[in-house]
């Protein structure tokens, strides 16, 4: 992701802490963008260069075994494991969100928030295939991304609700249930939000 790469550049100043990341974006009912309708996004970075994150509640039409075999890796038997669609940007690239349980750390990963890390390292998948990777993880194909000022514009138009990250929404395979739970965490539901919009 852009901000992460910029931070790694030698001699470059660290950006100021973001007021938006980490956080969760919850799509408002009636969002017209078909891809992002009824989605929950973990916003990982936000700054002058834009923003980026991963969609948490859109399951991909293939499982981890199938994906790993396509890359030449055979997964240790442990039952089926889903894969998620992280967003429309770079859908061929994988990102792994995993709970930091004191195990191995990987190159090119970042701490999203205490207890949760994000990695783009293929070594995570190699360890998963060998049965020695993170115990609680999700593989996300692609990511969500916004250019400079784009997310702020969408927020101003009321496209998203924002809230603190909820780790209970990680690795959920029922997309609508995760979206409704995220709304519930704000003390509201779809019908209430729709009524608020209609009366505005």
Image: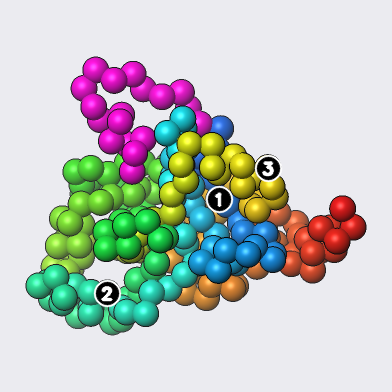
Left or right, residue 159 beside residue 148: right
Residue 180 location in percent, x, y? Answer: 65, 67
Residue that badge 3 annotates? 156
Residue that badge 1 annotates? 24
Residue that appears at 55% across and 50% down: 24
Quadrant of image for the N terminus: top left
> Magenta region: which residues?
1-18
Residue 88 location in percent, x, y? Answer: 40, 61
Residue that badge 2 annotates? 64
Residue that appears at 65% across and 53% down: 159
Location of residue 195 by image quarter: bottom right
N-terminal-most mark, 2 or 3:
2
- Report, in whole angstroms, how far the alpha carbon at label 3 lies from the one at label 1: 16 Å
Secondary structure of the residue carrying numbered label 3:
helix
Residue 7 within the magenta-colored segment of the rendering? yes
Q: Is residue 11 above or below residue 132?
A: above
Residue that appears at 60% across and 67% down: 38
N-terminal-most mark, 1 or 2:
1
């Amino acid at each position: 992701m852009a901000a992460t790469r910029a931070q790694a550049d030698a001699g470059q100043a660290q950006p100021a802490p973001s007021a938006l990341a980490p956080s969760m974006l919850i799509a408002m009912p009636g969002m017209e963008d078909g891809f992002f309708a009824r989605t929950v996004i973990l916003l990982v970075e936000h700054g002058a260069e834009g923003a980026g994150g991963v969609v948490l509640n859109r399951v991909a039409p293939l499982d981890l075994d199938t994906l790993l075999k396509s890359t030449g890796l055979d997964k240790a038997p442990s039952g089926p494991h889903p894969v998620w669609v992280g967003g429309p940007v770079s859908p061929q690239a994988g990102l792994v969100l995993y709970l930091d349980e004191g195990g191995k750390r990987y190159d090119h990963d970042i701490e999203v928030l205490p207890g949760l890390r994000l990695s783009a390292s293929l070594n995570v998948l190699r360890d998963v295939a060998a049965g020695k990777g993170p115990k609680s993880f999700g593989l996300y194909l692609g990511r969500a991304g916004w250019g400079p000022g784009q997310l702020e514009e969408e927020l101003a138009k009321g496209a998203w609700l924002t809230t603190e990250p909820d780790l209970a929404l990680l690795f959920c395979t029922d997309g609508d249930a995760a979206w409704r739970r995220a709304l519930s965490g704000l003390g509201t539901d779809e019908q209430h939000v729709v009524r608020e919009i209609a009366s505005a």
